Amino acid sequence: MSQLTTTLVQCDLRWEDPAANHRHLDTLLGDLDGNTTDVIVLPEMFATGFTMNSREQAQPMEHSESVAWLKAQAHKRGCVITGSVAIKEAGEHYNRLIWAAPDGELIVYDKRHLFRMAGEHERYAMGEGRKVITYKGFRILLSVCYDLRFPVWMRQQAAEDETFEYDAILCVANWPAPRRHPWRTLLQARAIENLCYVVGVNRVGEDIKGLAYSGDSLLVDFKGEPVVDHPAYEAFVETATLDLDALNEFREKFPAWQDSDRFELLPGVGH
């Protein structure tokens, strides 16, 4: 497969009300299925909003209503659906991105960089590793919100016998409107420096604390140019295509990767 159709779902979220958010999203998704899209991408913490009430809201994977809903949606629609939820595991709480495939497989990535300005590092545990998955010929690096600010963490780290580690970055977020310029800029920067597509899905609306979200969800191509880009504060569901042949052709014509530096990831200063 040389193409991956991807649906960005930018929407408002009901505060700490998973059942209401599940119903709302089911309505928004309408008749989307595997004939029209390969992957549906929801915002960060799509079931609750960006809650720090981890002890009350997080559930074990096997008992999570939101994980069960993702699995049911993937099966019903015949495509992948992904977004992050609060999960409890081994006495810790995680902001966990769930990749739910139509065959029932679940792949998870726990958010590495926790937004300390909201106290997330005091309410959730840090993820331990990166996650690159392969789906329909595309290799995809999974990430959540604040991860986007850390280019070393997200940088291509190809093995010695490989040229590229991944073809696309997926980032789900609850990124507030006062910082919408960094959000948009960083999505484009990650695409340019890594010669890859970037899919960034954010929410709109206002949370219980009165914090506004502008959305600005983007699908950015390997040159940093937006393919999907709607006016700020507008809810939308849009499907677009990632083309692997076009990506590989550009990488061959503009081989900046040949001048990149090898590096090793070390624990951060605050770890």
Image (cartoon, rainbow, N blue to C red):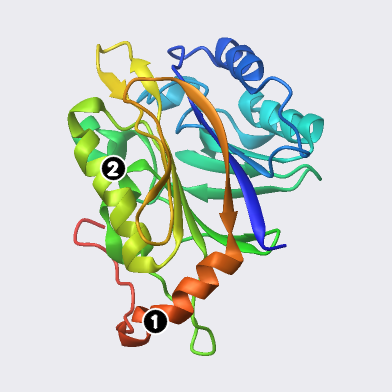
What secondary structure is marked by label 1?
loop
Locate the C terminus and report the quarter of the image it occupies: bottom left
Identified by mark 2, the residue type is Arg
33 vs 113: above or below: above
- Alpha carbon separation for disc pair 1 and 2: 25 Å
Question: 97 left or right of 179?
Answer: right
Image x and y of residue 211, in percent: 25, 17
Q: Which residue is mark 2?
A: 184
202 vs 161: above or below: above
Residue drawn at x 44%, y 25% as measured from the top left: 55
Specify the quadrant of the image occupied by residue 18: top right
What secondary structure is marked by label 2?
helix
Q: Are marks 1 and 2 in contact (CB under 8 Å)?
A: no
Q: Which residue is mark 1?
A: 255
Residue drawn at x 73%, y 40% as measured from the top left: 79
Asked whether residue 246 is in view, the answer is yes
Nearest the camera: 194 or 242? 242
Question: 22 left or right of 159?
Answer: right
Residue drawn at x 42%, y 22% as measured from the top left: 49
Identified by mark 1, the residue type is Pro
Image x and y of residue 172, in percent: 44, 39
Task: Give the mark nearer the N terminus: 1 vs 2.
Answer: 2
Q: Rate crowding at label 1 as few (under 14), some (14 to 19) or many (20 or more) other CA atoms within 10 Å.
A: few
